[in-house]
Image: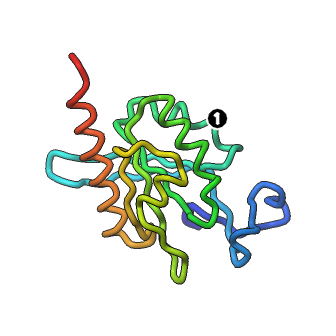
Amino acid sequence: MPLRTEAIVTKASEGYDALEATPSKHTTTVAMDFGRITLADDLVLYLFGTPGQRRFWFMWDDLVRGAIGAIILVDVRRLEDSFAAVDFFEARRLPFLIAVNHFDGGARYPADAVRRALALREEIPVVDVDARDPRSARAALIAITEYALMNLSSLPG
């Protein structure tokens, strides 16, 4: 069986995954993702991902070691779940952006409304994404790469 980022929700996951905002959810997130994508001949990104739930926080410090940037994938139905990730990356001064994940029939909000709701600084990018669409995900990766490189080039020394 191939390794997947989601598994069927079972009795064992009760109490770990909040399903109130997503009553039709039938899968639960697995702890870690890894990927590699070539954006250009001279630009290869190594991607590491972990869910935002508290039980995975112990991984975050290891995952950001050597990182140039981060994407916080936001579900506007559960916006409060994003605050810990925002605080984490701000405290470590790691460039990040907010990728608002859009689902079929889901509510859509302007970037400024999401920025205000998350109390973000004006310069933090907020982009729309459909994480199921490779072109959309690639656009978000390009956006964080450009933002991170811009921030790195503005550092003294």
Q: Name the residue carrying label 1.
A: 58
Q: Residue at x 63, y 56 (%)?
A: 30
Amino acid under disc 1: Phe
All told, the count of numbered labels is: 1
Residue 85 in the image: x percent, y percent? 56, 43
Which quarter of the figure has residue 111?
Answer: bottom left
Query: Observer-nearest residue: 46 or 17?
Result: 17
**Residue 31 in picture, x, y percent from top left:** 62, 50
Residue in view at x 83 percent, y 61 percent: 14
Quadrant into which the C terminus falls: top left
The answer to whether 156 is drawn above or below residue 117 in the figure is above
Horizontal and vertical percent for residue 117?
54, 54
Residue found farthest to the left? 41
Could you tell me which secondary element the residue under label 1 belongs to?
helix
- Is 12 situated above or below 26? above
Residue closest to the eye, 7 or 80? 80
Left or right placement of residue 125 versus residue 74 in this view? left
Quadrant assignment for the N terminus: bottom right
Mark 1: few, some, or many residues within 10 Å (few <14, many ≥20)? Answer: few
Instruction: Classify residue 53 as left or right of residue 50.
Output: right
Q: Which residue is drawn at 28% across and 44% down?
A: 147
